[in-house]
Image: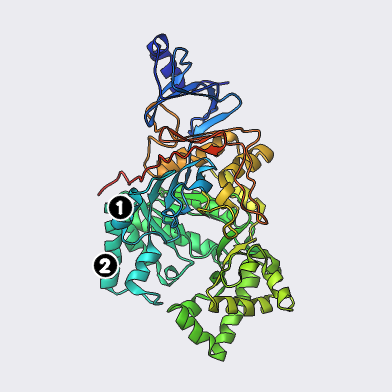
Amino acid sequence: MKFYLPYLFFLFCFPFQELQAQQYDILIKNGTVYDGLGFEPVKVNIGIKGDKIKALGALKNATAPKVIDATGLAIAPGFIDLHAHINNLPKMPTAESALRQGVTLLLGGPDGGGPLDFKIYLDSINQLQLGVNVAYQVGHNVIRKKVMGLDDRAPTADELEKMRGYVKEAMEHGAFGLSTGLAYLPGTFSDTEEIISLAKVAASYGGFYTSHIRDESLNLIKAVKEAIIIGKKANITVVLTHHKALGAAMWGASKETLRMVDSANNQGLDIRLDQYPYTASSTSLAALVPSWAKAGGSEAFKERIAQSDLRDSIRMGIIYNIVNVRVGQEIERLQFRSFQWKKNLEGKTMADWARMENLKPTPENAADLIIQAELNGGAKMIYHVMHSDDVDRIMRHPLTMIASDGKLSQIGKNHPHPRSYGTFPRVLGYYVRERAVLDLEVAIKKMTSMPADLLGMKSRGRIAENSYADLVLFNPETIKDNSTFEDPHHYPSGIPYVIVNGIISIENGELTGNRSGKLLLSPTKK
């Protein structure tokens, strides 16, 4: 086992800590420590006092009221989820579906969503007893909708200034950056210059720009190029979030998108990526409906559907998106995740619905069913549309971080994507142990110090003296995601301990009832 300079420096330059009894709140002994920086692991004990790691070493004379024997366990910094849908955090403040994965920090506000009245919202979050640390971005879509509704046009000068004002206000109150969902309403109606203008505001406060790019399928290359242009013109760090090549027509395109990322960085830009470890995405059923048909909202959509010529055009657009953008002829790849109008279809596929209606499972019949669904409130879907080679290739890229794109989930409620329960243990169990796509220390780095560095948090995401004691203890031989597409409501196994800010939140695989998370604000100001 190799010992690296930081540990040698600590062990040999501070021997007095070994010669006198040291009192800690928690002492973790006999574990294998992965520092989060990508170095090989070391055998050291950890002394925690308050919310910080206070010592690393043999700690032979140390005592603590709580001693954890970590024999056979890996000890890593708590995992940081850079893409988390946590709008339901006030109802689920423990964030159990994240905490049980070893996640100790969630970044909310992705895909252009999140809070609008930023200070008021964060004040309300600050009143909660949180199970994990949380931080937020400000979302373009919620801002644009507030200022312009669902209008399909460019903003006036006054409207653009109002949107810039919302970004400025959020950044001044602790937002870490700007997010966009350019495939969603109303972000899809914005042009590149609008995003550049808003990103410049975030950049002036040291923030970064996270983008669900405009198209992850047929126009993937063009959409990645747009994100790079935004990064260059706004002088801002860019994260291509949940990066993927979506649809059979684009399988293999990650070779080109990763080359573009490398080229941009070689020219002095700062382009990064995050990814969830699955070959299926999840978004709304409305993603199959042409954007122009949704302009103006649900009532405008109903009016268009009532006109036979427009309905025909919308239907043809849906068929095109099913066949060319998503799943080809295989509509069984369209799986219902949440469907309030027809709860009995949750977990089932579009092909199942067609058969229930005595229809052949074809894209044409699916288009008619999708129109019905959208007229009755829509649905959330799982799209089985990615190739494992692209997932592996993106995961191996040195600038890719791991993020769930998951929603806080409760056992038995709806039919979530398994990423909500299993993202981080899936990487460690399936992609590291079973398939050796990544080395363990590299995988941990992608979940810890890399996202912490993006957030400007040098005292989180790593195991070092005076770092915050956000830790996860797991068994590298047994850690496993147990959530599946067919049966998602299962917590992972092989994670006996999770510590948040020096407090044990998971012990022997069970909740302790302690909620020691904090609202974290951006350290950067203009």
Vertical comparison of 296 with 491: above or below = below
Q: The residue tagged with tag 1: helix, strand or loop?
A: helix
Give the percent coordinates (x, y) of residue 319: 63, 76
**Dot 1 amino acid type:** Asp
User: In this rendering, would 315 be left or right of 83?
Assistant: right
User: In this rendering, would 483 be left or right of 518?
Assistant: right
Camera-side residue of 253 and 479? 479
Q: Is residue 43 visible?
A: yes
Q: Residue at x 61, y 32 (%)?
A: 475
Give the percent coordinates (x, y) of residue 364: 67, 79
Q: Residue furthest front?
A: 513
Q: The residue tagged with tag 2: helix, strand or loop?
A: helix
- Pointer 2: what residue? 161
Report the colour scheme: rainbow
Quadrant for the N terminus in the image: top right
Vertical comparison of 225 with 80: above or below = below
Mark nearer the N terminus (1 vs 2): 1
Q: Residue at x 63, y 77 (%)?
A: 369
Q: CA distance from mark 1 to mark 2?
A: 25 Å
Camera-side residue of 175 and 28? 28
Give the percent coordinates (x, y) of residue 57: 46, 18
**Dot 2 amino acid type:** Glu
- Pointer 1: what residue? 123
Q: Residue at x 61, y 71 (%)?
A: 342
Q: Residue at x 51, y 64 (%)?
A: 222
Mark 1 Cα-neighbour bin, 10 Å: few <14, some 14–19, many ≥20: few
